[in-house]
Image: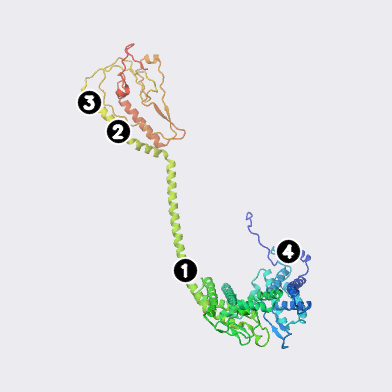
Amino acid sequence: MTGVIPMTARRPSPRRPSNSQLLTRVRDRSPGLAAGLVGGAVAAGLGLGALTVLVMVLWISSPYPDSGPGGALHVAAALWLLAHGVELVRADTLSGVPAPVGVTPMLLSVLPVWLVHRAARDAVDADEDGVAPPVGARTAWAGVVLGYLTVGAGTALYAAGGPLRPSWAWTVLGLPTVVALSAGTGVWTAYGRPRGPVDRLLRLLPGETRRVLLGPREREKFLVAVRAAGAAVSVCVGGGAGLVAASSVWHGDLAREAFLQLTEGWSGRCAVLLLCVTLVPNAAVWGAAYALGPGFALGTGHGVGPWVSDPAPMLPPFPLLAAVPDAGAGTPWNWAAGVVPLAAGVTMGWFVGRGGMRWSVRRTAVIAGLAATVCATALAVAAGMAGGPLGVGVLARFGPVWWQVGGAALAWGVGVAVPVAVVVRVCGGWVTRWRTAAATKAVTRAAAKAAEEASRALSLAQARATASRTPEVSRTTASRTAEAPRTTAQKATAQKAAAQKAAAQKTAPPKTAPPKTAPPKAAATKATEPAKATSAKPPAPAEPLAPAKPPKTPVVAPRAGVTLRKKTATPVTPEAAAAPPSPRTPSKAPESEAYDLLPADEPVEDVWRDEALRARWDALRDELRNRTPEPDAPTDAGPEPSAAQAGPEPAPPAPEDGGTSGTP
């Protein structure tokens, strides 16, 4: 096997780099924990700096600032903590009672989460060559988390002296949770998203649930359920955003009035506009909760839903709150919001049914129920993040209630997704079988057509090969077919002429045929007329000639490549003409044909050669039969030519030396 050449190179294991690479990289960089600390601190500083710049720009552009630069910096620090889910407390109120502010703008939380994720991924320092990073996963994660929380603790201490103070309970619980989860996903992504950490987390679940999720075949089913749940959540949240947009357009006058009432300067209006933009994901979740049925709370004891709307009477003027439906019982337009969860359930069932074509109907229903559970959990978490308190008393409850939203989502999923998944599974099986049968028929039809075309092409190729191998036979057959009528006519004419001549000879008295001498004619005048030889003895009385048989057609059309050469007559000297012929050597019969067949450069086919020789010998035999058998009698070369062909008969020459006649 020394000649085998490997076609693919094995990629080095990500866990076993070479010692030289490790030493070089460790020597050229700082220790892993220190790098993680620096990366976490830089990520926290970038997020805090971005918010600080934004707040300072708005403070500078404000015509009537309430405080100095210190107050603006405190507000920036408080907003940074609020982006991590930390609840703030507003101490300066009219009643003197601190009011909590727990509604976190979900779009504002995207910035710090992305920064922590990116810092943890870069702290692992995995290169593109597949070599394992010198920094361990736990070391990189711990460094990033500690560095970020160090900056977070300092920021919380600084914000505690401002008008918006962080809640220490939320600071201790919320901030580390967000940072730890974001850093963990970053490290997991840097290592190529392995399954080990996920399986270790899933082992914390109960035994039956763990078996369902971690089995060899159950993993695929769980992934199908997760994809279906993700699609349903997207449809539900997107439908909620559409409801908010439609309601805002419907209540456009109230929204514009609230926007202008909040502030008069352009800097304040820009601040209100930015706040509305960061709260758009929250409004979408609120719309999804409204479509699911439970709705959301606008104060303690006041709820808004498709069946009834009862908002608090004293709501602060805000453009997004202007989109809340009017107070009173629901109308068919409000009930039409149920189309959103219905579409989400159908989408979930479709994904499960299409992914479970190989499963049984019962297993498909179970996976659809699992997808509904995952979808309900995701919507419950989103509802908990989208709401919170905005004060005390009536404003203590603001937004959707998470457990109500989760329960409604589960009910919609089980009631809609499970039947749709079963129907899609059953109908999909029928459709699959029908498509398989149709495809089989199409393939069979195409194969039969291809076989027929191949057979036709093979027959045509064989016919062409046969024609190319024996073209002479085909030409000979065609020539015979074309000459058959002409040959028949010639035979009939010759037989009629022979019969007339025989009748004339029987009635006429016998006469002595004088010796004939052929007139000198040029060879080019008539090439097919044979030369006439005369005998040197005195003329003798001739016997009646037998009727001549018509000659057969001796010559066949030559094949391609056969050369026709004209026979040249041998010149006769006067001495040879005057000399008498030898009695022992009979005179050679002249050739009856002025042309003979010469062999071509290529060998002649046997069939054509045999036909040509047979025709030639037939012609010679007929010519010899027409001659007089006596050697001393003058011979006649063949049937007398007609008057039109022979012309006037020449006078016999005077005999010389005993009646010897010469040849021309």
The secondary structure type at the circle numbered 2 is helix
Mark 3 lies on residue: 503
- In the picture, the quarter occupied by the C terminus is top left
Mark 1 or 4 closer to N-term? 4
Observer-side mark, 4 or 3, equals 3
Q: Which mark is residue 30?
A: none
Residue at image x 50%, y 77%? 419
What is the C-alpha distance between the residues marked 1 and 4? 55 Å
Which of these two is toward me, 577 or 382? 382
Residue at image x 22%, y 24%? 506
Q: Judge left or right: residue 541 versus residue 31.
A: left
Mark 4 lies on residue: 18
What is the C-alpha distance between the residues marked 4 and 3? 124 Å
What is the C-alpha distance between the residues marked 3 and 2? 22 Å
Mark 2 lies on residue: 489
Mark 1 or 3 closer to N-term? 1
Mark 3 or 2 closer to N-term? 2
Q: Amino acid at mark 2?
A: Ala
Task: Please report contact status of discs 1 and 2: CB closer than 8 Å, yes or no.
Answer: no
Which image quadrant is residue 463 in?
Answer: top left
Q: Amino acid at mark 3?
A: Ala
Observer-side mark, 4 or 2, equals 2
Observer-side mark, 1 or 4, equals 1
Q: Residue furthest left?
A: 507
The secondary structure type at the circle numbered 4 is loop
Q: Relative to 28, does residue 243 appear above or below in the rendering? A: below
